[in-house]
Image: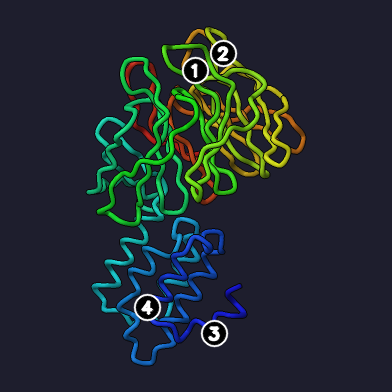
Amino acid sequence: MWPEHSVLYLNLDFQNIFKILSSDKLKNENPQTVWQVMHDWMNHDETKNRLTHFKILIIKCLQIESLQLQFVENNIFQSYIFRLLPLEFQKELTKFIKNLKLLLVCINKNNGLVQFYDPQHKSWHSSPVSLKLPIGKYEYQLALLGNMLYAFGGRVMGTQATNLMWSRDLSDPSSQWTARANMKQSRKQFCSVVLNDTIYALGGRGNNNEYSLRSCERYCSQLNEWSTVADMNSERSGASAAVINGCIYVAGGRMGLRVFKSVCKYCPETDTWREVAPMTTQREHFTLTPFAGRLWAIGGRGGGFQSLRSCESYDPVTDTWREEAPMKEVRWEHAAIEFNGKLYVAGGSKSVKRKFKRESFL
């Protein structure tokens, strides 16, 4: 839409260009294209008065987290209009944008304190913004759609599970948590993924410590509505899920005292699940993370609550698993993410003691 028609928007005033760029219709637009339109609109003004709107357009309209850091540095920081900004403003905006591009965001689920990890300088930074949640203190899930952070499910009192969902706009430091539609099923110890701008809640456990669930549901943010999808082939709690090649994979977990190796694959086009090759190791409370075209199962706990440092990866093309280099330490309930060709693992538990160290795999 934009490249061939962007000239039509060059003469719009700020209110109208902001309305267009921040509209829901552009959520799926390539953020590089959105940046180009913003750039051309500001550059079109010979008086350069439009530069006063630079920051608000960046914060509210551009999905910085979806851009590669190299694009940000080469196309935003090196742009002509950026260098026209006052030097102090350039420094402030550079710091803000780079904070959005920091690798790991760790949220303390007890007090809501946020820490960012900077891979370039190998350092952690505390954020002045608290994200203390108004819902479950434990075992809830977080999902990010654009600049909107969603928190849902979890355990609130004792063994009581909840179906509550809240959201908060991360682009606005003054924003507050806002209640959203409740899930159809109260869940704790469940897993979740984002696929095609839709949040999926998968399995887990319900209220009163009942057995594991096989039910699944998905959330549409535009409609603020949850809807059920096909049940998994078996009940699972403490499982892990990931998306690769447009499909959802759910691996491991437990039912009662039995810890699984099994893996199931969900196709959203047909709303069906099927079993794929199982892992070589039983795992629960581990991470399943896309990396280098494969799904990496990292750490967790095995049968008998044994903490693991072993890793294995799955090839979705050949439907096979292979052993990978183990972590330096055992850990479960940790976090893992791919960034710039490396796989990072942070936090989690060793036994009853928490470990907040970081590891990376190249």
- Say whether marks 2 and 4 touch (CB < 8 Å): no
Disc 2 crowd rating (10 Å Cα; few below 14, some 14-19, many 20+) is: many
In the picture of the structure, the residue carrying the numbered disc 1 is 301
Going by the numbered disc 3, the residue's amino acid type is: Val
Q: What residue do we see at 48% from left, 11% from top?
A: 210
Disc 1 crowd rating (10 Å Cα; few below 14, some 14-19, many 20+) is: many
Mark in the foreground, 2 or 3: 3
- Residue 214 falls in image quadrant: top right
Going by the numbered disc 4, the residue's amino acid type is: Phe
Q: 215 and 356: which one is in front?
A: 215
In the picture of the structure, the residue carrying the numbered disc 2 is 259
Q: Earlier in the sequence, mark 1 or mark 4?
A: 4
| 189 is higher (above) or lower (below) than 21 | above
Label 2 sits on a secondary structure element that is: strand
- Residue 351 falls in image quadrant: top left
Give how far across and how far down residue 161 sits, in percent: 40, 21
Q: Earlier in the sequence, mark 3 or mark 4?
A: 3
Q: CA distance from mark 1 to mark 4?
A: 54 Å
* Image quarter (top left, top right, bottom left or bottom right) of the N terminus: bottom right
Return the mark for residue 199. Answer: none
Q: What residue do we see at 29% from left, 42% from top?
A: 131
- Say whether marks 2 and 1 touch (CB < 8 Å): yes
Give how far across and how far down residue 212 sits, in percent: 53, 16
